[in-house]
């Protein structure tokens, strides 16, 4: 009997910086045992590529965001996922009213004890720091 890959959904505000990067990191590190998608709680970047600075930073570290297009969270995406990883507490709180009763147990922050800092409107160094934090937290989701 074949088991399907574990399905993980990463979520940030606009699906423009953190969640796409986390999805790329988890996909690369997790290999065929994990299927990862990303979404945003707002519709600000639906259909748009990832932030250009994040795309550049990701590429320098071996992650490809060039095919990313922003998606807004839906109940169907929550149902699809085995785990839903919010990049910060604000995003986590925004997911609760969207999630059905059966999906609420899947919701948690990407980092248990802290938020992943949002690099939006910050210098390039903030995008590098975001990548470092996301990579450091990734292994907890691949066990």
Image: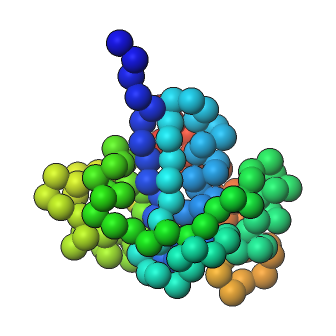
- Between 121 and 132, the residue placed more toward the observer is 121
Q: Is residue 113 above or below residue 80?
A: below
Name the residue located 34 percent from the left edge and 44 percent from the top edge.
Answer: 82
Hey, which residue is sitting farthest front in the picture?
A: 47
Hey, which residue is sitting farthest top in the picture?
A: 1
- Between 88 and 40, the residue placed more toward the observer is 40
Q: In the picture, residue 119 is in which quadrant?
A: bottom right
Q: Is residue 106 above or below residue 93?
A: above
Name the residue located 82 percent from the left edge and 65 percent from the top edge.
Answer: 56
Residue 111: x and y, percent? 48, 56
Q: Is residue 88 above or below residue 106?
A: below
* Placement of the N terminus among the 4 image quadrants: top left
Name the residue located 32 percent from the left edge and 76 percent from the top edge.
Answer: 94
Q: Is residue 97 left or right of residue 76?
A: left
Q: Is residue 138 left or right of residue 72?
A: right
Q: In the picture, residue 70 is in which quadrant?
A: bottom right
- Between 105 and 113, the residue placed more toward the observer is 105
Q: Can residue 32 be seen by looking at this rendering? A: yes
Residue 17: x and y, percent? 63, 70
Hey, which residue is sitting farthest right in the picture?
A: 60
Q: Is residue 118 above or below residue 11?
A: below
Name the residue located 34 percent from the left edge and 49 percent from the top edge.
Answer: 80
Residue 117: x and y, percent? 58, 72
Q: Is residue 32 left or right of residue 85?
A: right
Q: Can residue 128 be seen by looking at this rendering? A: no
Residue 63: x and y, percent? 74, 51
């Amino acid at each position: 009997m074949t088991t399907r890959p574990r399905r993980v959904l990463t979520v940030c505000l606009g699906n423009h910086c953190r969640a796409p990067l986390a999805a790329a990191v988890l996909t690369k590190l997790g290999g065929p045992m994990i299927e990862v998608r990303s979404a945003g709680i707002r519709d600000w970047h639906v259909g748009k590529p990832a932030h250009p600075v994040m795309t550049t930073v990701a590429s320098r570290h071996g992650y490809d965001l060039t095919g990313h297009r922003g998606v807004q969270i839906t109940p169907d995406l929550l149902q699809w996922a085995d785990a839903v990883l919010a990049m910060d507490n604000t995003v986590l709180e925004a997911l609760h009213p969207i999630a059905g009763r059966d999906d609420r147990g899947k919701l948690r922050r990407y980092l248990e004890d802290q938020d992943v800092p949002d690099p939006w409107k910050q210098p390039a160094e903030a995008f590098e720091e975001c990548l470092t934090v996301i990579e450091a937290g990734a292994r907890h989701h691949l066990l």
